[in-house]
Image: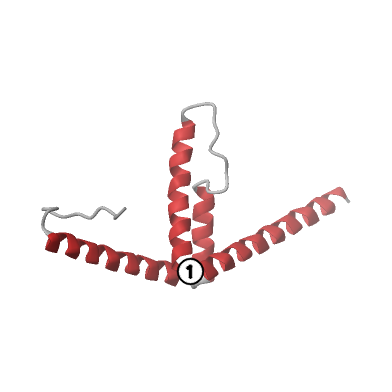
Amino acid sequence: MAEPVDVRNAADRVQVRDARDRAKFDEVDRYNAIRATLATAEGRRAIFEWCVSLGLFRSVFSTSSQIYHAAGMQDAARRIWQDCEAASLELVELMQREALTRQKAELAERTAARSRERR
C-alpha cells in the first residue's frame, strides 16, 4: 500500500507525483541527519538514552490507564529505533555494543563500591 501524501487534489497525478517526490527527499534528508548523529559517540549515546527513557526496553504493562501512555511512549521509541536501523544498521549495532560496555562498566563500579563498603 502506498504511503499517504499531502495534496490539494488527489485526482491530479502531477500533484500526487510531486508530493511523493518531496516525501522521498524528506526521507533521504532524515536518514542523512540520523546517520550524522549516529556517526558520533555522543550522538549514539544520546539516541540510545532517549530510547531507553521512552521505555523501548521496558514492559508497558500496568494495572491502570497508565499502560496507554507507556505504550505510546514505547511506540515513539520504536519509530526512532526503526529510523536509525533504516539509516545505518552498522551504527545501530555499534550503539548497542557501546551501551553494553557502559552498562558493564557501571556494574563493575557498583560491585567494587559495595565490596569497599563491606571492608
Locate residue 50, reporting x and y percent.
49, 54
Point out the residue furthest to the top here.
Answer: 64
Q: Residue 77, how many percent across, how many down? A: 47, 51
Which residue is at a point 50% across and 26% down the rendered structure image?
64
Most foreground residue, 28 or 40? 28
What residue sits 51% from the left and 67% below the top? 89
Residue at image position (29%, 55%) is 2
The residue under the point 17% across, 59% down is: 16
Q: Nearer the viewer, residue 49 or 113?
A: 49
Q: Name the outermost residue toward the front.
A: 1
- Given residues 29 and 5, the one toward you in this image is 5
Category of crowding for the residue at label 1, using alpha-carbon neighbours closer than 10 angstroms: few (below 14), some (14–19), many (at least 20)? some
Q: Position of residue 49 (x, y in %)?
A: 53, 56
Type of residue at label 1? Ser
Q: Which residue is mark 1?
A: 88
Q: Is residue 49 left or right of residue 37?
A: right
* 12 with respect to 108 (left or right): left
- In the rendered image, residue 48, in percent from the top left (x then y), is placed at 53, 58
Q: Is residue 89 above or below residue 63?
A: below
